[in-house]
Image (cartoon, rainbow, N blue to C red):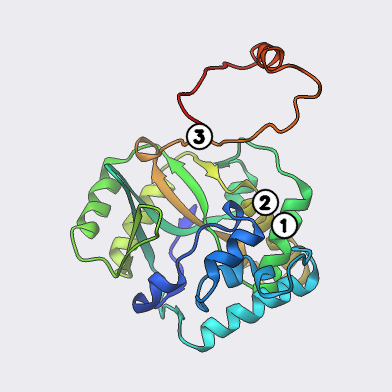
Amino acid sequence: MPLIRPFRGLRPAPQHAAEVLAPPYDVLNSEEARARAAGRPWSFLHISKPEIDLPPGQDPHAPEVYAKGAESFGRLLAEGILIRDPTPRYYVYRLRMGAHTQTGLVGTASVAAYRAQRIRRHEFTRPEKEDDRVRQIEALNAQTGPVLLAYRDDADLDTRLAAVTGTAPEVDVEGGDGVRHSVWAVDDPGWCARVSERFEAMPVLYIADGHHRSAAAARVAESRAAADPGTGAEASYDYFLAVAFPASQMRILDYNRVVRDLNGLRPEAFLARLADDFTVAPADAP
């Protein structure tokens, strides 16, 4: 079973990409998502945060929420906003954020490799968050967000990706947050085969983000295989959506949290307790 393979993607039609583009589901709360999607009927938030199309206060994990997401997904397909590519392919994906650029490959990654720790994890997962992603996959019969993977730099892959990004992208849009997204779809069988071979030669890939998405995909694969043993041939559920970047191009951004209750401690005492286990440094601004 290949580590990474091309696939027939469902993606925004290029002329509608800017109208569909939306932040990941887990960086906005329901109110923020509702405001962001207002007046934008094709925003992907109608699929990834479907509670925004139900009355405020709706439990985001209720069955009707997943059903609403499936309804919106079907609508964007029926209206031609989302299209399915006719043949399997890889997608070269470039992100530009100010002076920083990173270029990776979108494909599907092997669930078997994930289970065998060839695709390596570094986080524990929460069952309720896994359950949420399982329900969404089952409701849509699709995976809506890629697992972010990192791989050790490979000069041959760099050369092959650079040859693609030297041409005009099919999609080139800015998301309103200063990040420019560019996409190239590559369906040349020889190119795809050589890229697959380069990944096959890698001993491991590393999950940088998406532990709940990958765990959910593995659970769905297990349940579907049990329900339909078939002939042992590979099925689409044996792979999960992934985007892989060379490690040297990855950026680690801060992950901020606000402490609202010091549990009776004065700020100085709270910081001193934190310093027992962490490095504490003042910042110039919030």
Say whether disc 3 or disc 1 marks the residue closer to the N-terminus.
1
Q: Which mark is residue 219?
A: 1
Instruction: Judge depth for marks 3 and 1 and give the one in front.
Output: 3
Residue located 34% across and 78% down the image: 15
**Disc 1/disc 2 C-alpha distance (Å):** 6 Å
**Mark 1 packing: few (<14 Cα in 10 Å), some, or many (20+)?**
some
Q: Looking at the picture, does residue 41 appear above or below residue 108?
A: below
Q: Report x, y in % for residue 248.
A: 35, 35
Q: Tell me, yes or no, whether the two marked residues, 1 and 2, touch with CB atoms within 8 Å.
A: yes
Residue 198 in view, yes or no: yes
Q: Secondary structure at mark 2?
A: helix
Q: Secondary structure at mark 1?
A: helix
Q: Is residue 264 left or right of residue 191?
A: right
Residue type for callout 2? Ala
Q: Which mark is residue 254?
A: 3
Q: Is residue 83 left or right of residue 172?
A: right
Residue type for callout 3? Asp
Query: In this view of the protein, which residue sits in the foreground, 39 or 244?
Result: 39
Q: Secondary structure at mark 3?
A: loop
**Mark 2 packing: few (<14 Cα in 10 Å), some, or many (20+)?**
many
Q: Quadrant of residue 92?
A: bottom left
Say whether disc 3 or disc 2 marks the residue closer to the N-terminus.
2
Q: Looking at the picture, does residue 224 appear above or below residue 240?
A: below
**Disc 3/disc 1 C-alpha distance (Å):** 30 Å
Q: Report x, y in % for residue 284.
A: 45, 24
Q: Quadrant of residue 172?
A: bottom left
Q: Report x, y in % for residue 280.
A: 57, 17
Instruction: Judge depth for marks 3 and 2 and give the one in front.
Output: 3
Query: In this view of the protein, which residue sits in the foreground, 150 or 31?
Result: 31
Residue 8 in view, yes or no: no
Q: Which mark is residue 215?
A: 2
Residue type for callout 1? Arg
